[in-house]
Image (cartoon, rainbow, N blue to C red):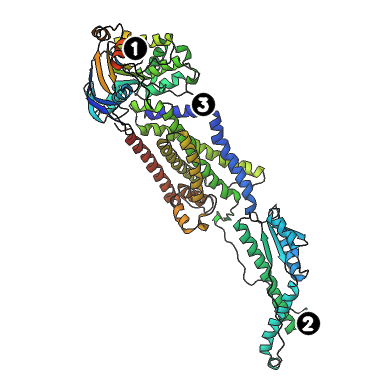
């Protein structure tokens, strides 16, 4: 125990003498979490502060194009800029100046009305025996195409969202036109309401509740756990460098000749770096609770969750430390451990769902994400932050994180023993 | 005290044996010099005796304890002064020594007293609370030495303890080691400074190509070699004048 305490104190002294390193350990995660939350905040807002400018070329100049423009403007997501020609709009989008151009074809309103009238008359004639014999001569109405030009750098998710939105607008206009045509056929009084044209089916999102209050997720509730975990796992880099340094500066050779086990040496590092993880976590919670509201972001709601959050942070920290110890034990130089550690954390984060939710990943990656400790940590954090679950529900995840720590540390010890076996 | 029997060591990537079927006995209370040109196998032999590397074959005992079956007891029995400084640069001399002393189970005031006494003996007490990174090479060597003797080892291994230090530091180190020897510590050291070894060692062994060439008291070896006036001339006559560059 005395040796473990001495090792822990030595690690504390080493860390405390590296002021630059401490600053990086504690300040950079805060910068990361503030930056990412600010960037992602708009995607969580129903009314965005920023409107995306898009181009619209109106070759129709009818009521359909008018409706499209109105719907786009009402969406509050876009700032519609009218352009005169398709070529100009296309060039502006393809050179990256705008993300999207919508080209409304000529005679869209007229042809839509003709097509709808033709269809409605056809249906009406089926119910009108006298009319069945009066066959009207059908003219071929060409299909219309609303063209969309996207900046090649635009993300697929944005494209899909815009396409769905425009599809919905067009469907709605078509439906309204059909209702209108029927109304004209059935009633001579244009003010009479024959059809209710509003949506019959609507949807309502039911939120999980915390003490009878809806838990409404926001960018902070999503980002703080995800990026806190990312920052905690970055402990791999300084920790692996610390272990490699022991080897390169010769102190490890001395320790190998001393009557102290490698487990004790690693134990000292584990305790100190676990404290670092916890301090990082506390700082990030403080930023979420006190700093975010001051810069206009939602407040991080930790009410009633703190004990569970700390439990998750401790076990996530242990998993990260285990990986750092293993990497430091295997790596021969800092040039090996530092870039590998940093890249590996990014890979684990990607696999774990920090950037892209796991459910939209390909099947293979979804399976792979199950073995990412960051996925276990993220799920545990989401369970506590967003799903309002208790200790029992997060036991599997924190159990896996602890197991990961034990396994990686054991591998580090066994590897070291084998390598230095006498 | 130290009984080495048929020790051989061949590194995985090496073509030849670094140490080959070496037998050696080192008696208690001796100051024993392991001498040889670069690549002769001195550091390899020392590393084997310190349990840092595993011999390919053969065995050894220290104070009757076999290296395989009494690993931990041997660690408590020996002290090692590695060629590199093996200290934490950002810790003070006192903090370094306190930590390495703790690894031998030493603690409290007893450890503090030992550290201060050793620092005083080697002229470093005034620098106890300075970071190692601010020390000169000679000062680092002296702290490196203290870190290895706080637990009062029965056998002290030193790998070129005076390399790269000034004459003053070298004298202080040698005198300190002689005092330790008088108190009962057996000292085994490697060096390229043959004049130093001639004056300092009670016995020397010259090894080359991993084999023991000769062993004996320095004066005895000099007298046995016709025309040799000092240990360096004995050394050159036994190992040749050719360069020993290796990579």
On the picture, is B187 further left or further right than A300? Answer: left
Q: Quadrant of residue B73?
A: top left
Camera-nearest label, 1 or 3: 1
Judge the density around disc 2: few (<14), some (14-19), many (≥20) Cα neighbours within 10 Å.
few
Q: Residues within 10 Å of mark 1 (few under 14, many from 20)?
A: many
Is residue A76 visible from the viewing direction of this image? no
Placement of the N terminus of chain B among the 4 image quadrants: top left
Instruction: Identify the subunit bearing mark 2.
Output: A
How far apart are labels 1 and 3 at the CA level?
41 Å
Residue at 60% x, 66% y: name it: A203
Q: Which residue is mark 2?
A: A189
* Secondary structure type for disc 2: loop
Please state if A37 lies on the left or on the right of B41 as rendered. right
Q: Secondary structure at mark 3?
A: loop
Percent position of residue A233, x then y: 49, 42
Disc 1 and disc 2 on one polypeptide chain = no
């Amino acid at each position: 125990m005395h040796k473990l305490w001495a090792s822990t104190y030595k690690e504390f002294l080493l860390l405390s003498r590296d002021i630059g390193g401490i600053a990086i350990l504690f300040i950079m995660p805060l910068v990361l979490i503030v930056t990412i939350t600010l960037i992602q905040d708009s995607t969580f807002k129903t009314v965005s502060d920023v409107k995306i400018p898009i181009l619209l070329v109106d070759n129709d100049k009818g009521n359909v194009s008018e409706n499209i423009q109105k719907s786009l403007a009402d969406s509050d997501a876009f700032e519609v800029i009218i352009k005169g020609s398709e070529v100009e709009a296309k060039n502006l989008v393809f050179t990256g100046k705008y993300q999207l151009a919508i080209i409304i074809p000529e005679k869209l309103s007229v042809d839509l009305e003709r097509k709808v009238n033709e269809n409605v008359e056809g249906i009406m004639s089926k119910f009108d025996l006298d009319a069945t014999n009066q066959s009207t001569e059908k003219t071929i109405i060409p299909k219309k195409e609303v063209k969309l030009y996207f900046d090649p750098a635009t993300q697929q998710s944005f494209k899909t969202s815009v396409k769905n939105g425009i599809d919905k607008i067009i469907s709605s206009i078509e439906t309204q036109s059909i209702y209108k045509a029927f109304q004209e056929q059935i009633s001579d009084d244009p003010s009479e309401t024959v059809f209710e044209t509003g949506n019959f089916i609507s949807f309502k999102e039911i939120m999980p509740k915390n003490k009878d209050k809806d838990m409404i997720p926001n960018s902070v509730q999503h980002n703080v756990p995800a990026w806190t975990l990312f920052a905690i796992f970055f402990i791999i880099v300084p920790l692996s460098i610390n272990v490699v340094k022991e080897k390169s500066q010769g102190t490890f050779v001395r320790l190998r000749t001393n009557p102290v086990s490698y487990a004790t040496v690693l134990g000292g590092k584990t305790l100190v770096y676990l404290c670092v993880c916890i301090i990082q976590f506390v700082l990030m919670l403080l930023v979420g609770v006190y700093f975010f509201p001051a810069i206009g972001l939602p407040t991080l709601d930790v009410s009633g969750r703190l004990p569970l959050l700390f439990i998750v942070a401790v076990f996530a920290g242990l998993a990260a430390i285990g990986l750092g110890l293993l990497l430091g034990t295997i790596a021969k130089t800092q040039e090996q451990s530092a870039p590998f550690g940093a890249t590996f954390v990014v890979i684990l984060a990607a696999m774990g769902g920090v950037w892209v939710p796991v459910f939209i990943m390909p099947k293979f990656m979804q399976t792979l994400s199950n073995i990412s400790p960051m996925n276990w940590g993220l799920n545990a954090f989401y369970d506590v932050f967003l799903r309002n679950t208790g200790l029992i529900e997060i036991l599997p995840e924190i159990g896996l994180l602890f197991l990961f720590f034990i396994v990686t540390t054991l591998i580090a010890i066994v590897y070291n023993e084998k390598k230095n076996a006498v | 005290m130290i009984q080495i029997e048929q020790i051989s060591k061949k590194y995985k990537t090496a073509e030849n044996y670094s140490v080959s079927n070496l037998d050696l006995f080192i008696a208690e209370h001796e100051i024993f010099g392991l001498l040889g040109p670069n690549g002769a196998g001195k550091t390899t032999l020392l590393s084997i005796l310190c349990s840092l590397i595993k011999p390919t074959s053969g065995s050894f005992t220290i104070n009757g304890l076999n290296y395989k079956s009494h690993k931990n007891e041997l660690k408590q029995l020996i002290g090692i002064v590695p060629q590199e400084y093996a200290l934490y640069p950002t810790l003070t001399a006192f903090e370094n020594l306190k930590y390495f002393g703790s690894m031998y189970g030493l603690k409290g005031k007893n450890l503090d007293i030992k550290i201060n006494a050793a620092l005083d003996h080697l002229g470093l007490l005034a620098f106890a609370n300075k970071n190692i990174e601010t020390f000169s090479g000679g000062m680092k060597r002296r702290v490196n030495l203290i870190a290895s003797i706080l637990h009062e080892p029965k056998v002290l291994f030193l790998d070129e303890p005076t390399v790269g230090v000034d004459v003053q530091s070298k004298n202080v180190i040698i005198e300190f080691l002689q005092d330790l020897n008088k108190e009962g510590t057996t000292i085994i050291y490697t060096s390229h400074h043959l004049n130093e070894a001639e004056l300092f060692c009670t016995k020397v062994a010259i090894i080359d190509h991993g084999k023991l060439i000769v062993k004996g008291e320095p004066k005895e070896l000099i007298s046995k070699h016709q025309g040799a006036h000092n240990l360096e001339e004995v050394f050159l006559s036994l190992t040749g004048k050719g360069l020993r560059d290796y990579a």
